[in-house]
Image: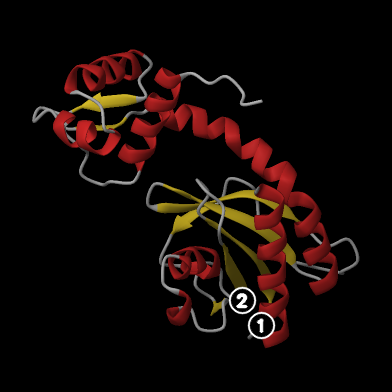
Amino acid sequence: MTAETSQTLDRGLRVLKLLADTDHGLTVTELSNKLGVNRTVVYRLLATLEQHALVRRDLGGRARVGLGVLRLGRQVHPLVREAALPALRSLAEDVGATAHLTLVDGTEALAVAVVEPSWTDYHVAYRTGFRHPLDRGAAGRAILAGRRTDSERGPGFVLTHGELEAGASGAAAPVLGVSGIEGSVGVVMLAETVPEQVGHRVVRAAAEVAEALR
C-alpha cells in the first residue's frame, strides 16, 4: 500500500531543494517551470515559506533560501555528531591522534565532533566549534577536494603541515555521497609529516561516517 503524502508539503520541500542548489536564487517563473506547476501555486508556496523565514525574496523578486534554514541546520549537528562518533573513536584509537568531523558552515570549516585518543602520552588539543577557512588546514582542503570529480581527487585524502597550528600536521578525507552534508573526517597530530597509511585510514573512516549518515 502506498503511504499517503502531502502534495503541498512535497512541493514546498522541492522549492527549498531547488533554491539550495543555486547561488543566485530563482524567479517565480523559473520555479514554476522546474516544478511543473502554475505561477499561482509557486506564489502561495513562497508566501508560506517566507512566513517561516525559510525563503526570502530580494528586490529583483528572486527567491533564495532564508535564514530560518540555518536555525534548522544547527539542530542537525548533534544528530550528525552522534552518528559519526563510533567511526571517529575507532580512528583516534587506531592512529593515536585526535580525530574530528568537520562540516561546511558558510565559507568556513566548522568542527562538529572531536575524539581524542585514550592511550597516547600527548596529542593535539582540537575543540568542537573550532573554525577556519576552507582553503587552510586538511579538513577544509578535503572538503574542497570533495567538490571535484573522482579523477581530480588523487589519493582521496589531503595532508597538510603547520597551516593551522605550528608543528601540527593533518590528514583528512571528504565525506561523500550524503545528501545535504558537505564535510570531512580527519586527524591532527604533532609530527612533521603524516604517514601515507594514516591518510588511507582516514579515507576508510570518512566512508564509515558517510554510511552512518545515509
* Outermost residue, front side: 1
- Residue 17, compared with residue 210, is above or below; it is above
- Quarter of the rendering occupied by the N terminus: top right
Count of numbered circles in the view? 2
Viewer-closest of 31 and 56: 31
What residue is rendered at 67% in x and 86% in y? 196
Question: Taking 137 as reference, is 26 left or right?
Answer: left
For residue 210, the mark is none
Label 2 packing within 10 angstroms: few (<14), some (14-19), many (20+):
many
What residue is rendered at 33% in x and 28% in y? 66
Residue of label 2: 169
Choose the circle earlier in sequence order: 2 or 1.
2
Where in the figure is residue 47, as x and y percent of width and height? 27, 15
Q: Are marks 2 and 1 in contact (CB under 8 Å)?
A: yes
Question: Taking 100 as reference, is 156 left or right?
Answer: left
* Outermost residue, left side: 60
Amino acid of disc 1: Val
What residue is rendered at 31% in x and 26% in y? 55
Residue of label 1: 194
Label 1, secondary structure: give it: loop
Where in the figure is residue 2, as x and y percent of width and height? 61, 26
Where in the figure is residue 155, as x and y percent of width and height? 56, 83
Label 2, secondary structure: give it: strand
Question: Taking 23 as reference, is 94 left or right?
Answer: right
Question: Taking 93 as reference, is 53 left or right?
Answer: left
Amino acid of disc 2: Ser
Instruction: Report, in whole angstroms, how far the alpha carbon at label 2 lies from the one at label 1.
Output: 6 Å
